[in-house]
Image (spheres, rainbow, N blue to C red):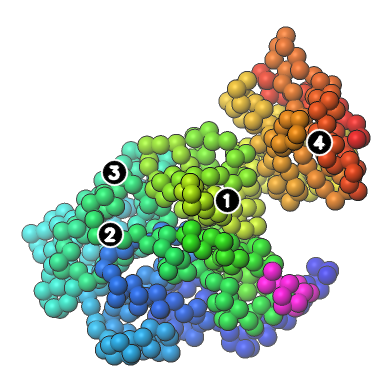
């Protein structure tokens, strides 16, 4: 459909949607605002009931923009006894059956989401502000001077004044640490402040009714996880997998009208639109028990923005910076070829992040770029990989400037020209582009040790960005082919050779290896034309020097 026609149809549908008063909670973080404002709500309150009636102290890790803040806000409204906000929801019926009485508890909230923790005193100021808000309700013990002492005294006083245990809700506890990963001194300072502050949770257990901490990452060196023996980490519990995010059933039950409107804009039917939404935004799995289910968990931020604007776009990657992730990847020196094809690890390798290691996998997983794609019960190994097309594209666009040399503002132009060259079988054109890109790679990475890996990585990222099928180190009966790229009309079989001074490996030798070992043989019987490419590049300078091609 022509772009102008799409835009016109979108405007008309948006107008009709506004007339129908279907309010989407885009950017709404308050449960009370959501309910009193008449916004659509995916009912998660059965999870609230189970949490508060089956345990006391919890930790939940979920990616950013995944609904943690609205969960904390819902818990706050529940413990403040605001029964009217829950009318008609699952918890209203459950309470009526099992109790019938809504009790009000003293609630202490600590929200770290909004601060700029790259400033020296921000964390102490945020904690002070949260404490002062609660002290206005329950008073302040003037003998308590430190933040930790004030916290301790506040919990005790809240219990004594109300006769009920305090409820402690902590949202995005780890933001002061994630914001300062590139500032070791400030990171350590923030870490020590959090250690001293959260240690209080263990000492006030007798005066608390319920506690929940949420975050993106479980930092193993924050003492709350080692000192709080009663802290229950529900991040990988099957029964709480859907406590945040949106399931397939919830999507179809709550947003049926919006799905139909989107289908009209896209010119597709209802089922086709659902399939597209699944490819783009579904696929998260947070426990091994449900990993083989065809339906995963949707990113709620992306879905709401899709329905609000009636556009399929990469919303999540645009919602916040992930520079810290790029820095960790580059510092670790991890082989990106392995990451892009999925990686197998044990649970300890991705559930806790240690600041003194160069392992980027926990941050990649916990920040939402990876999810659990498979699990081998015999070995205890988890296969981690991209959950959906939006995240895969976002990750590739994030790292492309650092691993391919493609300038940030020119990524889409470069990728579009590559696609044209490959579709047309124009080898010289796309290899010339590769030559230019590889010449711009950071010079500190162009060493004899990793040049071939970097060259393959650049190939892999670029072709993945184009949405083309590419396999590096393709295992074939006679050996491993460096790269195989598939388009609608062509199959490109590529072999690289390193030139090291007097030991010169030529493009001709690379092409001869393809022919001698029959790398192209599996593709000759198909309908696509086979093009074999031998490439020679300099191990010292990293330059792509020559290439030679022939049709199979």
Look at discs 3 and 2 and give the one toward the viewer. 2
The residue pinned by badge 4 equals 493
Please rate how many residues cluster around mark 1, counting C-alpha atoms within 10 Å: few if below 14, some from 14 to 19, many from 20.
many
Q: CA distance from mark 4 to mark 1?
A: 25 Å
For the residue labelled by badge 2, is the local secondary structure a helix, a strand or a loop?
loop
Distance between mark 3 and mark 2 Cα atoms = 24 Å
Instruction: Judge the density around disc 3: few (<14), some (14-19), many (≥20) Cα neighbours within 10 Å.
Output: some
State yes or no: discs 3 and 4 in contact (Cβ < 8 Å): no
The image shows residue 516 at horizontal and vertical percentages of 84, 25
N-terminal-most mark, 1 or 3: 3
Query: Is the Cβ of the residue at disc 1 closer than 8 Å to that at disc 2?
Result: no
- Residue indicated by mark 3: 189
Point out the residue furthest to the top here. Answer: 502
Dividing the picture into quarters, in which one does residue 18 lie?
bottom right
As measured in the structure, the alpha-carbon distance from the residue carrying label 3 to the one carrying label 4 is 53 Å
Give how far across and how far down residue 314 sits, in percent: 63, 60
Q: Mark 2 or 4 closer to N-term?
A: 2
From the viewer's perspective, tell me whether residue 315 is left or right of residue 324: right
Q: Which residue is mark 1?
A: 385
The span shown in magenta is 264-275
**Coordinates of residue 58 in the picture (x, y in percent):** 31, 63
SS category of the residue bearing label 4: strand
Q: Is there CB contact under 8 Å for labels 2 and 4?
A: no
Answer whether residue 438 is visible to the viewer in this image: yes
Q: Magenta span has 272?
A: yes
Mark 2 lies on residue: 231
Q: Is residue 114 left or right of residue 453?
A: left
């Amino acid at each position: 459909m022509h772009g102008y026609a799409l835009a016109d149809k979108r405007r008309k549908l948006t107008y009709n949607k506004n007339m129908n008063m279907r309010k989407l909670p885009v950017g709404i973080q308050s449960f009370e605002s959501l309910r009193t404002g008449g916004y659509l709500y995916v009912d998660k309150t059965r999870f609230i009931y189970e949490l508060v009636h089956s345990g006391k102290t919890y930790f939940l890790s979920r990616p950013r923009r995944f609904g943690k803040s609205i969960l904390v806000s819902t818990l706050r409204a529940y413990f403040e006894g605001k029964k009217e906000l829950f009318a008609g929801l699952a918890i209203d019926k459950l309470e009526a059956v099992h109790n019938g009485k809504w009790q009000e508890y003293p609630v202490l909230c600590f929200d770290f989401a909004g601060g700029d923790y790259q400033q020296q005193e921000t964390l102490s100021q945020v904690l002070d502000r949260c404490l002062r808000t609660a002290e206005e309700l329950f008073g302040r013990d003037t003998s308590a001077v430190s933040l930790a002492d004030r916290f301790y005294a506040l919990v005790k006083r809240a219990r004594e004044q109300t006769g009920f245990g305090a409820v402690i809700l902590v949202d995005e506890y780890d933001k002061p640490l994630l914001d300062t990963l590139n500032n070791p001194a400030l990171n350590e300072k923030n870490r020590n402040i959090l250690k001293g502050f959260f240690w209080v949770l263990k000492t006030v257990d007798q005066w608390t009714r319920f506690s929940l901490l949420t975050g993106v990452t479980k930092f193993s060196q924050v003492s709350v996880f080692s000192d709080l023996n009663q802290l229950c980490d529900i991040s990988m519990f099957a029964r709480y997998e859907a406590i945040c995010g949106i399931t397939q059933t919830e999507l179809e039950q709550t947003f049926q009208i919006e799905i139909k409107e989107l289908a009209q804009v896209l010119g597709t039917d209802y089922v086709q639109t659902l399939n597209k939404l699944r490819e783009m935004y579904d696929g998260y799995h947070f426990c091994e028990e449900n990993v083989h289910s065809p339906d995963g968990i949707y990113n709620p931020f992306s879905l709401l923005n899709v329905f609000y604007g009636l556009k399929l776009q990469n919303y999540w990657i645009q919602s916040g910076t992930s520079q810290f992730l790029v820095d960790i990847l580059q510092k670790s020196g991890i082989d990106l070829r392995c990451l892009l094809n999925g990686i197998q690890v044990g649970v300890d390798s991705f559930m806790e992040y240690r600041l003194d290691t160069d392992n980027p996998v926990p941050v990649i997983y916990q920040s939402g770029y990876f999810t659990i794609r498979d699990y081998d019960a015999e070995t205890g190994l988890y296969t981690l990989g991209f959950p959906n097309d939006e995240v895969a594209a976002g990750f590739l666009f994030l790292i492309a400037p650092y691993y391919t040399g493609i300038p940030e503002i020119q990524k889409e132009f470069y990728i579009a020209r590559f696609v044209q060259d490959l579709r047309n079988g124009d080898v010289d054109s796309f290899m010339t582009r590769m030559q230019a890109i590889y010449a711009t790679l950071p010079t500190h990475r162009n060493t004899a040790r990793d040049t071939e890996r970097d060259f393959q990585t650049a190939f892999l990222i670029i072709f993945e960005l184009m949405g083309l099928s590419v396999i590096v180190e393709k295992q074939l009966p006679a050996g491993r082919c460096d790269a195989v790229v598939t388009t609608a009309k062509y199959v490109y079989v590529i072999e690289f050779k390193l030139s090291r001074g007097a030991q010169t490996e030529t493009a001709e030798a690379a092409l001869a290896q393809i022919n001698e070992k029959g790398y192209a043989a599996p593709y000759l019987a198909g309908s696509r034309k086979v093009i074999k490419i031998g490439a020679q590049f300099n191990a010292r300078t990293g330059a792509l020097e020559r290439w030679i091609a022939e049709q199979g």
